[in-house]
Image: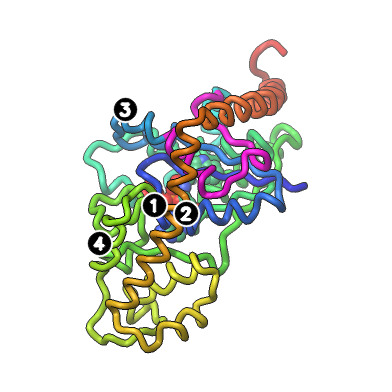
Amino acid sequence: MKRLLTGLQPSGELTLGSFIGGIKQSVKFQDEYESFIFVPDLHAITVPQDPLLLKERIKKNVALYLACGIDPNKNIIYLQSENLYHTNLSWILECHTYMGEASRMTQFKDKSKRYDNVSVGLFTYPILMAADILLYDADFVPVGIDQKQHVELARDLAGRFNNKYGTTFKLPEPLIPKIGAKIMDLQNPTKKMSKSSEDIKGLIFLLDNEDVIRKKIMSAVTDSDNKVYFDPENKPGISNLLTIYSALSDLDIKQVEEKFKNYNYGNLKKEVADIVIEKILEIQKKYHEYMDSGLVDEVLNKGLKIVQEIAQNKYNEILKKVGLGRI
Ligand code: ATP
Ligand code: LTN
């Protein structure tokens, strides 16, 4: 069975976009691949975080993964910061990364514009991501298009290391959903719904309550033409609502367009709100059960044990090849 590895940064509360574009894909893959799903919490501190909120969010995210359908019997689930081999390998890889290639990462260029004091960690973040992937010889890495360049860096570093020291790492491939729904911000529908956005009116969080969800959807930005059809370029707001409905109903976009063709915007929004609320309440019910039951710690302890053993073996092989330590 091929191995798949992915993670969602706990840089903000998980949103409907994280569910439809990220977690739902992983649920689909869990029967096809040996799946490693982890919380890249070390990545979250590349930008400022409140320690108490971060700690709480890490646990909440794991409970939400499970509530969204990530099966702990089919996935190995763990926290990045608890397995010290990630950062150790990251250092070794940093010493094999050229300044030029690290400086070409477009996400750094975008993110660094948002902060006054940019940390060195934000710059080296893709190398830690390479370590996350290479440590476990992942074959496939499901990510959004914005992360493709980082997986390619991991691949380049693996190739370089293998050439220098002999075959050590698998060359990972990014797995980018071809027709994967991209969920847009409700207030700014040409921009991705992103969990770290500052204006939360355009975001639906998986832990929002029913009234808040309805209010956010009913005030979604649309256009003034009052005709319902799918045209992301000219009607990004309406197209986003149709995309959300399609993703949650498992109807394709043509069927959704047909269903709503004679609706006005108000009625369309109402039905979109209904289906989002139904799905999110179902997730929240399981989430509360898992948060109260101790399941999260159980799953993380089990995952950590498995990944530590795999990582230790790999790391020892690397030390030996690079000439470090005494093995
Ligand atoms: P951040 O705001 O911290 O940069 P984000 O909300 O943009 O995060 P990521 O954690 O970078 O999301 O994304 C994790 C995964 O979820 C990726 O595979 C990404 O493509 C997917 N994803 C996140 N948001 C959306 C969205 N709005 N629509 C579709 N997919 C999404
Ligand atoms: N950078 C990713 C999160 C991430 C990741 C990884 C994803 C960190 N390490 C390894 C896949 C594999 C993000 O911001 N979405």
The yes-or-no answer for disc 2 within 8 Å of ligand 1 is: no
Question: Which numbered tag is attached to residue 52?
Answer: 3
Q: Residues within 10 Å of mark 2 (few under 14, many from 20)?
A: some
**Badge 2 amino acid:** Phe
> Residue 75, percent across and down?
64, 41
Q: CA distance from mark 2 to mark 4?
A: 20 Å
- The answer to whether mark 3 and mark 1 are in CB contact below 8 A is no
Question: Which numbered tag is attached to residue 15?
Answer: 1
Q: CA distance from mark 2 to mark 1?
A: 6 Å
The yes-or-no answer for disc 3 within 8 Å of ligand 1 is: no
Q: Nearer the viewer, mark 1 or mark 4?
A: 4
Q: CA distance from mark 2 to mark 3?
A: 24 Å
Asked which secondary structure carries label 4, the reply is helix
Q: What is the span of residues highlighted in magenta in the rendered image? A: 58-83
Q: Residues within 10 Å of mark 4 (few under 14, many from 20)?
A: few
**Badge 1 amino acid:** Thr
> Residue 44, percent across and down?
39, 37
Would you say 73 lies left or right of 221 here?
right
Query: Where's the C terminus, which quadrant?
Result: top right
Examine the rendered structure and indicate whether residue 301 appears above or below residue 184: above
Task: Name the residue rendered at 36%, 79% in the picture.
Answer: 233
Q: Which residue is mark 2?
A: 19
> Residue 160, percent across and down?
65, 41
Q: Which residue is mark 4?
A: 215
Q: Which circle's residue, 1 or 4, is located before the other in the chain?
A: 1
Asked which secondary structure carries label 1, the reply is loop
**Badge 3 amino acid:** Leu
Task: Name the residue rendered at 71%, 42% in the picture.
Answer: 170
Asked which secondary structure carries label 2, the reply is helix
Please check the rendered image and state whether residue 72 is part of the magenta-colored stretch, yes or no.
yes
